[in-house]
Structures are given as C-alpha cells and as structure tokens.
Amino acid sequence: MHPNKTSPADIPPTRSGGSALDRFFRITERGSTYGREVRGGFATFFTMAYILVLNPIILGGAKDKFGDQLDTVQLVTATALVAAVMTLIMGVGGNLPLALAAGLGINAVVAYQVAPLMAWDEAMGLIVLEGLLICVFVATGLREAIMHAIPQALKQAISVGIGLFIAFIGFVDAGFVTRIPDAANTTVPVQLGSGTLTGWPMLVFCLGVIMTIVLLARKVKGAILISIVVMTIVSVVINSLADVKSWGLTVPSMPDKPVAAPDFGLLGQFDLFGSFGQISVLTVILLIFTLILSDFFDTMGTVVGVTAEAGLLDERGQVPGLGRVLLIDGAAAVAGGAASASSATTYVESAAGVGEGARTGFANLITGGMFALALFFSPVLTIVPMQAASPALVAVGFLMMTQVKHIDWDRYDLAIPAFLTITVMPFTYSITNGIGAGFVSYVIIKACLGKAREVHWLLWGTAALFLVYFAIDPLEQILDIK
C-alpha cells in the first residue's frame, strides 16, 4: 500500500477532544492532520492552476457565429471565481479533497464546436442546460443508468479522442502545425510550421514541450504550471530584447500594474434557450448530449480514482456521499455556464493533493482560497502567450491518451468503434463526430454479429439520433425544410 494511503480499517476513531472543525471534516477520523490537508490543498492548486491560463486562451481565442470574442481578462476572473466557489462547496458539502474548475475538453467543445454555430451567450446557455440536466439525472438515478449503458471501451476511447483533439489544438495554436494555404493542390492539408520551424515564438513552444515532458517524466508536482511560468518569463525576456511580431493573440509584455480589481463583466451573460433559434432542435440535443458525456465520464472516473487512491472507498467499493458529490459537480456545470467560463468539473489533479496526504474537504478550503486570491492577479495571468501555454495542451493530451491501454484491441466489436471514436475526433476537428462514429459503428457491428441484445436501449436511441445528425443535410433537402 502507498505509504500515504489509508484504508477504512486503518482509520482510527474520532478523538473525543477534537475541535468542532476536526469533527466536521472528520480529519482525525480519516487518519489525517491539518498539516497534511494544508499541503494537499496547495499541491492541488499548483497542479491545476494552469486552467487560469488555458481556459481564457481556449475560449478567448475562438469566435462565435457573429465573429465576436470573449474578453480574456474577464475570462480569467470568471474561471478563477467558479473554481474558487465550487471547490469550496465541494469541500464543505462533499467533504472530499476534490477540486473543481473549467473542464479541459469541454471548453474545447464550446470554443470550437458550439460557439461557431451561435452567439457566446447562447453557447453558455447550453452549458447551463447541460448542468441542470445532469442535476436531474443525479436526482432520478438516470446518471448511473446511462453510465452503465455505454461500454467501458467507448468511455475510454472518448477520453483518448478528446486528448488527441486537445493536443492537436495545442500544436495548431502554437503555429507548430499550420494549414497549407492552397491545400486543394497538395497531397496533405497541414504542414510543419510554415514549411520549417522559424522564429522566437516557435523556439519558446518547442522548449516548453521539452520542459513539460521532462518534468512529467520525473513526476515533478506542478510540472505543467512550472513549464507555463518558466516559458512565460522566457517569452517576456525575448519580447523585451527582440522585435517579435508573431506572438499571436497574446503579447508577453509586463503590465504596468500586476494587481487589479476583478472584472465580473461576463457573469450572467447567458441565454438559456437562444440556441434553438440558431440551429435545429436535433443539433441542440446532440450538442447537449456531447457536453453531458464529457462531464459524465471525466467526473465518474476522477471521483472514483482519486477517492480510491485516498483509501476512502467503503467496503463495497463505493464513494462516500457519491450523490452529493455528483450533484455538486452538476451544479458546477451550471455555475460555469452562468459565468461564461464553460462547464466546471472535478479535476483529476486532485490526486496531487491526495499524494500530499489530503483526505478531507478541508484541503479544498486551501485550494479554493488560492483560486480566490488569483482573482486579483489577472493582469499577470493574461501576459502568457500561446507558445508558452500550448505545451500544456500537448501534455494534457498525453495524460488523457494513457487510457488507451485499457481498451481490449483483440475484441473487434469494441476495438473498431473505439478506434473510430479516437481518430474521427481530431481528424474532423469535432468531438461530436467522434462520439457519433463510435456509437453508430458499435450498434451496427453488434447487430451484424447477431448480438443486438447486448446493446442497451439507450445506445440504440442515441445511435439513431447520431444517424439523423450525420444525414441532416440530405434529410433537409428531401423534406425541403431549408
């Protein structure tokens, strides 16, 4: 057993003389101390604080249907606020060392798939609807039913596919991969840089990738954040010494004032049902379904994995207070959409805090408090250029890719749908397309093998929706409803 890990049998009873705070969070009962909880809270923050940089870059770098972009400074405020509030609520309400913030992967869906179809406030309205539906699913028990209906191999493939998609976005945002201007007359659609790797910004990106992967390989806590900070400093120095014109969206120059009052301009900027006036009802349903899937699998895997590492699963292998935890996670999605920060979800980086000894929600008070402090340092956080932050996307892509080892590649009825899910996502630049390809192929293969009864009715219905989604253009032409 891990030296820091405890099992239910090893947990001593609560000391009768413990403080009210100790008894509320069950710190002593779970074999922890205030010191371990504090160290764990800091470790979790420093391993996931990169989201304060990446979420504004991902959302702020995208345009909606009308060409509008979200303000980067306001996005930093919204991201930090939602992370602070929901992490504190999870600590007090769920009493588990699970921190929450805007979800990577989900924000990519919002930025590159949802927003181009509608206005930003309508896209965030979909996030709020998704969160409300998750809360309803938790209350009715349907969330667990849907989880059980989808084969484990497809769940893992969705995570892997999103990882590749995120990594591809990182390469493109940094300029490491670019679209060939006249791709129709070439054999390949993309290329390395401008044909070769040139310029100081590209050097920053390459060095950032090398630093990040080395730190990850050495299992350094906060590897991603360390790389972002170091390469941002390097970028600022380079920009002050050389006349660089190719940084892109964010130029690394020091602000006049590192501290500023938070800008809450994005809070409440959402339109709950506006999306229905921009795209078809079927497309809205499928987009919400895609967002729900991303939230479902990330949260379930993270909650079980982190609490198991902490030795907090009960004798039946269940998470204590799972209903409350899932309900808070659903509420985090609502809060993220309402603040225009994208859906917030439970972070696997919480495992860093567990590794430092955190066992209770008291650690979340530290993590949430740090996110609250970050509200006042947005001028510093918004000087990070794409080239310094994008290596983190590549690294997160790798971390999500590791789940590929759990897929049984010898079972073609599972492996082929998993393969299509993984490859279609980055190759079509669409997470929805990848999920749809996996679900439809899974149902078809099972039916052709005479195993239709093995497919849950929920999957049959979902696959039917995706078939209509893929054929929406010819169907609209046949029905003459364009």
Image: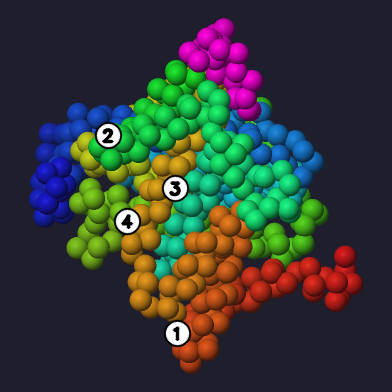
Residue at mark 3: 397
What amino acid is found at the position of numbered circle 4 in the picture? Val
What amino acid is found at the position of numbered circle 1 in the picture? Glu
Residue drawn at (55%, 19%), measured in percent from left and top?
A: 252
Which label is found at residue 454?
1
- Secondary structure mostly taken by the magenta-highlighted segment of the chain: loop
Which label is found at residue 220?
2
Residue drawn at (62%, 41%), measured in percent from left and top?
A: 178
Above or below 29: residue 200: above
Eye-nearest disc, 4 or 3: 3
Instruction: Report crowding for label 2: few under 14, some 14 to 19, many 20 or more residues within 10 A (C-alpha).
Output: few
| Residue placed most toward the observer, 220 or 195 | 195
What amino acid is found at the position of numbered circle 2 in the picture? Val
The answer to whether the residues at label 1 and label 4 have Cβ atoms under 8 Å apart is no
Residue at mark 4: 304
**Spatial CA span between label 4 and label 2:** 23 Å
Residue drawn at (32%, 56%), measured in percent from left and top?
A: 304
- Identify the image quadrant of residue 213: top left
Eye-nearest disc, 4 or 2: 2
- Label whose residue precedes the other's in the sequence (3 or 2): 2
Residue 371 percent coordinates (x, y): 44, 28
Residue drawn at (69%, 37%), measured in percent from left and top?
A: 269
| Residue placed most toward the observer, 304 or 53 | 53
- Label whose residue precedes the other's in the sequence (2 or 1): 2
What amino acid is found at the position of numbered circle 3 in the picture? Gly
**Spatial CA span between label 2 and label 1:** 44 Å
Residue stretch in magenta: 237-262
* Mark 1, secondary structure of its residue: helix
